[in-house]
Amino acid sequence: MLFHLAFRKELGRNFGATLLVLLTIVMTTMLIKALGQASSGRVNPSEVLLVMGYTVMGQLPTILTLSLFVAVTATLTRMYAASEMVVWFSCGQSLASFLRPLLRFALPILAVIALLALLAWPWSNQQIQGLRERYQGRNDIDRVAPGQFQESRGGTRVFFIDKDSPGSQSASNIFIATAEKGKQSITTAQSGRTETLGAQRFVVLSQGQRLDIDDTTGATRLMEFAEYGAQIGERELAAPRPQERPRYKSTLQLLREPTPRNLSELSWRIGLVLAALNCGILALAATRINPRVGQSAGLVFALLAFACYYNMINVGQSWIASGKVNIALWLLQLHGGILALSLLWLALRQGGCAIWGGRKSARGDDDGAAPQAARAQCAKAAP
């Protein structure tokens, strides 16, 4: 049908453009955040793009929902402004007639959002946490970066090696400061290397000295050495430990363990899918043209409505986690209430157009059809 095809085609163009813009903004933001984490030592600098990709994947359900909301609002706003809605109304289409092609366009997007929210979200969180734990669990010598002071895993030692060190297994101009068990020691050496014996790793320093300071008595002792060796940790890194936070658990695991915290996470994932459906219907019911405020008012309303809706989903998540509300009752009240409000709003606008057009016909149209001016007035001034 020409009406359905034209409407879905324009929705597709606006949805693609909006999604591209939002993805660019989110990817830029996440890249800056990942670079900040890498500079602070939380993630491996060589895995910044990987962390950014997993993070964007986890944010895709929200991005797709907002893109759908903005696309529907922008499409209807343009159609009202160009008097295209008047043409469709004159051809016998009503405002409710847009609901069917809208749902047909939105169903594949809703399916993708459901897959991302229920499956990809916990998986991406697990991957990011695994990367962080493997990087944080590396041995002390692996933490050292040339030209930078680096703290050991336990926080008891600080390392520094020369920026012009010859290779990854050797270094020059080494500085090590240690504080443990009421004593402090400062070790310097002209060069050093790492050696592996079995499952243990050692650092061997050459041509240096060590200064020990007793914090209790203040006594000091200075030693010089030709070679000095110290164990620095295991050869292999330990596997990442399993996470107990609900955001790292699969949806099936949340269903098997219906604790308040798990149910709160489950309500958030389900809420993203229901919110996408409600946002599309709400945009159809709420979009209109008011010459006094301009065409941008619809987009501003879409952003504000989405922000309020998303915040209510987060508030409900915290309430369910604290046991203040039941998950089924909250889903019914929030998402069912928004759906009922959207359908009621759509029905009121639909009835307003019908009543307006009926009054015009009763005033003297010979052929029983509303004049073009009355239809335009209905399309633009419907509440």
Image (spheres, rainbow, N blue to C red):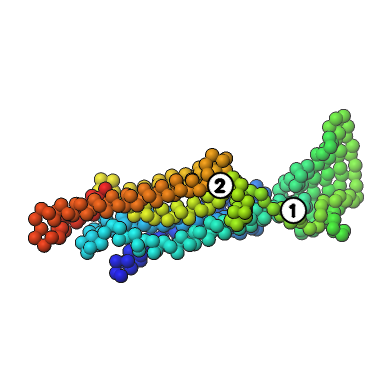
Kindly tell me whether residue 108 is visible in this rendering: yes
The amino acid type found where label 1 is placed reads Arg
Residue drawn at (85%, 56%), measured in percent from left and top? 200
| Residue 33 vs residue 290, the one in the foreground | 290
State which quadrant residue 66 falls in: bottom left
Left or right, 251 with reference to 378: right
The amino acid type found where label 2 is placed reads Ser
**Residue carrying label 1:** 138
Left or right, 293 with reference to 172: left
**Residue carrying label 2:** 264
**Mark 1–mark 2 distance (CA, rounded to whole Å):** 34 Å
* Above or below, comparing residue 358 to residue 325 in the picture: below
- Residue 275 image offset from top left, x and y in percent: 45, 52
Helix, strand or loop for disc 2: helix
Residue drawn at (71%, 54%), measured in percent from left and top? 240
Tag shown at residue 258: none
Residue drawn at (82%, 45%), measured in percent from left and top? 188
Q: Are marks 1 and 2 in contact (CB under 8 Å)?
A: no
- Residue 366 image offset from top left, x and y in percent: 8, 60
Q: Quadrant of the N terminus?
A: bottom left
Residue drawn at (20%, 52%), measured in percent from left and top? 355
- Residue 335 image offset from top left, x and y in percent: 44, 49
State which quadrant residue 250 falls in: bottom right
Kindly tell me whether residue 207 is visible in this rendering: no
| Residue 133 vs residue 147, the one in the foreground | 133
User: Furthest-bottom residue in view?
Assistant: 1
Helix, strand or loop for disc 1: loop
User: Furthest-top residue in view?
Assistant: 217
Q: Earlier in the sequence, mark 1 or mark 2?
A: 1
